[in-house]
């Protein structure tokens, strides 16, 4: 991979996570930061021949006019990214902004459409029209930047849940893309189809449907392309998948698990709409049953508190029962910058998907389960076991080179 150029195409490029990941990449390229937070910088991944940070170039889509610098200013004011890093990267950010293209908001719902400051096509256009637009943007990026491979990362606002029946095979779904009537697809799935049809690895870091639909996964397998998702595991859910196995392995019965999340960034304001929040709650709430082997009573709340900005507080209350039926409680508070937690994982995933793609892997990458709240291709939610599987994969591929 040493001399090859790798494109990173960020959908939702002007958002907090995309901007922090981009600034983080510049910091790594300029030697202005350590490798803290980056999984792929750990020793077990050293012999994988991963793409270098220097080889990477960023472009993307957004439904807001390019405003990465403005997002970076806000993140610096909030203490999420260092001000001196932003000052050193202004020209680099402007270059990335020049590569950001108008995105699509097909059936994304009113809250996401309200974010847009550009005209959006109505929803009664055929999905194929949107696919053609995204495909030509991706092709133009490849040609202009001379990149050998592009990894597409979906980082756009969380869509409402996908409703309604969809065919489960690509052969049945493909003709529907030419029709102008109602479909249950949303923009995240159209971005996924675009990438996979073009043979480009696709990461869905959000709870939106993306490539999780069976017919789109079928497309990936047929084209021999890999994808990974769904919903990055960065904070409270990460903690849950570490703690839940502890209760299970000590035979402590979890009776209820309550998690209250408060934060105030743009993502939080979109999740304030119950339709958009439903998808997030579903992925956050999925992890316990699989690990414990039974379903305790759970409650997950997500509240938008504007003054907190990107700083999320998650308070968890676990009520459990031990020997002789004695009830006990664990309470913990997680306070973190949402974007600083998510951004390094985005960079890791780009490297890992590029490596899987080079190894000829296709379909959902189950060995990346530790990165996601609802891992595609895997039912495993225990973080330690997920990480063990990642190490196994890394060892196999290190040995193969
Ligand atoms: N920060 C975390 O820890 C974390 C963890 C897991 C998942 N996520 C998910 O990652 C996503 C990004 O988070 P964020 O904090 O950067 O959000 P954000 O609101 O700051 O950014 C989202 C960006 O997507 C753009 N957008 C919305 N719909 C679009 C579309 N259809 N096409 C192109 N652009 C579109 C918006 O204009 C905005 O710039 C969210 O869905 C969030 O739920 C974040």
Image (cartoon, helix red, strand yellow):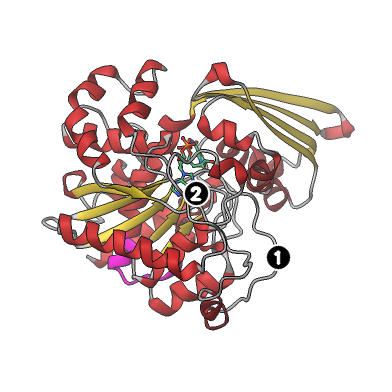
Look at the image and say whether residue 357 sits in the magenta stretch.
Answer: yes
Mark identifier at residue 164: 1
Looking at the rendering, in which quadrant would you find the C terminus? Answer: bottom left
Q: Nearer the viewer, residue 200 or 136?
A: 136
Secondary structure beneath label 2: helix
Q: Position of residue 200 (x, y in %)?
A: 34, 65
Say whether marks 2 and 1 touch (CB < 8 Å): no
Q: What residue sits right under mark 2 in the picture?
A: 370
Does residue 1 appear in the picture of this structure?
A: no
Quadrant hosting residue 32:
top left
Q: Residues within 10 Å of mark 2 (few under 14, many from 20)?
A: many
Q: Nearer the viewer, residue 363 or 73?
A: 73
Mark earlier in primary sequence (2, 1): 1
Left or right of residue 311: residue 356: left
Left or right of residue 68: residue 341: right
Placement of 253 over or under 120, stated as above or below: above
Secondary structure beneath label 1: loop
Part of the protein shown in magenta: 354-363
Q: Position of residue 140 (x, y in %)?
A: 23, 60
Look at the image and say whether residue 373 sits in the magenta stretch.
Answer: no
Q: Position of residue 205 (x, y in %)?
A: 48, 48
Quadrant hosting residue 94:
top left
Placement of 259 over or under 385, stated as above or below: above
Name the residue located 39 percent from the left edge and 72 percent from the top edge. Answer: 197
Q: CA distance from mark 2 to mark 1?
A: 30 Å
């Amino acid at each position: 991979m040493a001399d090859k150029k790798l494109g990173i195409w960020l959908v939702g490029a002007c958002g907090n996570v995309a901007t922090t990941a981009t600034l983080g990449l510049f910091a790594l390229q300029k030697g202005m930061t350590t490798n803290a937070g980056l999984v792929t910088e750990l020793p077990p991944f050293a012999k994988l021949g991963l793409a270098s940070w220097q080889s990477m170039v960023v472009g993307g889509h957004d439904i807001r006019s390019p405003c990465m610098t403005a997002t970076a200013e806000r993140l610096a004011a909030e203490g999420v990214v260092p001000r001196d890093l932003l000052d050193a990267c202004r020209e680099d950010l402007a270059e990335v902004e020049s590569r950001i293209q108008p995105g699509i908001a097909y059936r994304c719902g009113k809250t996401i459409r309200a974010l847009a400051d550009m005209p959006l096509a109505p929803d009664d256009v055929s999905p194929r029209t949107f696919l053609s637009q995204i495909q030509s943007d991706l092709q133009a990026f490849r040609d202009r930047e001379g990149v050998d491979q592009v990894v597409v990362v979906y980082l756009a606002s969380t869509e409402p849940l996908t409703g309604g029946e969809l065919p489960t095979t690509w052969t049945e779904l493909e003709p529907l893309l030419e029709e102008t009537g109602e479909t249950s697809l949303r923009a995240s799935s159209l971005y996924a189809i675009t990438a996979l049809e073009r043979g480009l690895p696709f990461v869905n870091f959000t709870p939106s449907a993306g490539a999780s639909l069976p017919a789109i996964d079928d497309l990936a397998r047929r084209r021999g392309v890999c994808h990974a998702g769904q919903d990055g595991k960065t904070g409270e859910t990460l903690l849950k998948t570490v703690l839940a196995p502890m209760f299970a392995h000590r035979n402590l019965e979890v009776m209820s698990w309550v998690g209250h999340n408060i934060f105030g960034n743009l993502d939080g304001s979109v999740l304030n709409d119950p339709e958009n929040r439903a998808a997030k709650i579903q992925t956050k709430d999925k992890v316990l049953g699989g690990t414990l082997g039974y379903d305790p009573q759970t409650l997950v709340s997500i509240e938008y508190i504007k003054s907190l900005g990107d700083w999320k507080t998650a308070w968890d209350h676990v009520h459990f029962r031990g020997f002789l039926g004695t009830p006990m409680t664990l309470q913990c508070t997680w306070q973190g910058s949402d974007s600083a937690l998510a951004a390094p994982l985005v960079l890791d995933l780009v490297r890992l998907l590029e490596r899987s793609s080079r190894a000829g892997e296709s379909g959902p990458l189950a060995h990346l389960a530790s990165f996601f709240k609802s891992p595609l291709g895997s039912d495993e939610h225990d973080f330690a076991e997920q990480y063990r599987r990642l190490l196994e994969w890394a060892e196999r591929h290190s040995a193969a080179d």
